[in-house]
Image (cartoon, rainbow, N blue to C red):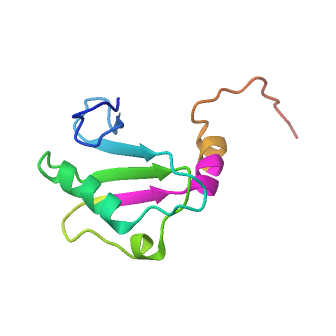
Amino acid sequence: MGRGGDERVDGTIKEDKLGLDNIYIQAKRWKPGNGVGRPEIQKFVGALAGQGAKKEIFITTSHFTKETLDYTPRNETKIVLIESEQRAQHIIDYSIGCTSQQTYEIKK
């Protein structure tokens, strides 16, 4: 996980069981109202370019500026930007960091 000298990576997701394809994650806690600018995203993409990373996720507690949302890397990198409101919905939709307490089965 993230630490000094980690080349801006806070975590990785192994997309397949053999670990042949990784998704790299960067998470930033920013104060509400302070948008994440394009330079932050470019630094993240650039830091991982040397590792051959092609899939990246950048998560923030704030929001991304319009300039950031319009940015598309000019290499094979695909990057997903997740803002504060989206983050909460992803946590619910994909059960990230939570578990079901009870499940109900409805039959016809």
- Is 88 situated left or right of 39 in this image? right
Disc count in the image? 0
Whole-percent x and y of residue 33?
59, 62
In the rendered image, the residue lying farthest to the right is 108
Whole-percent x and y of residue 13?
36, 36
> As rendered, which of 12 and 37 lies closer to the eye?
37
User: Looking at the rendering, which quadrant does residue 107 occupy?
Assistant: top right
Asked if the stretch drawn in magenta spans residue 33, the answer is no
Asked if the stretch drawn in magenta spans residue 80, the answer is yes
User: Looking at the rendering, which quadrant does residue 8 occupy?
Assistant: top left
Q: Residue at x 28, y 53 (%)?
A: 44
Quarter occupied by the N terminus: top left
In the rendered image, the residue lying farthest to the left is 50
- Is 100 situated left or right of 37 in this image? right
Whole-percent x and y of residue 3?
31, 30
In the rendered image, the residue lying farthest to the top is 101
Whole-percent x and y of residue 68?
40, 70
User: Looking at the rendering, which quadrant does residue 2 occupy?
Assistant: top left
Q: Residue at x 27, y 32 (%)?
A: 4
Q: Residue at x 41, y 76 (%)?
A: 67
Numbered range of the magenta stretch: 79-89
Q: Is residue 37 above or below residue 11?
A: below
Q: Is residue 54 above or below residue 108?
A: below
- Is 62 situated left or right of 65 in this image? right
Q: Is residue 108 above or below residue 77?
A: above
Quarter occupied by the C terminus: top right
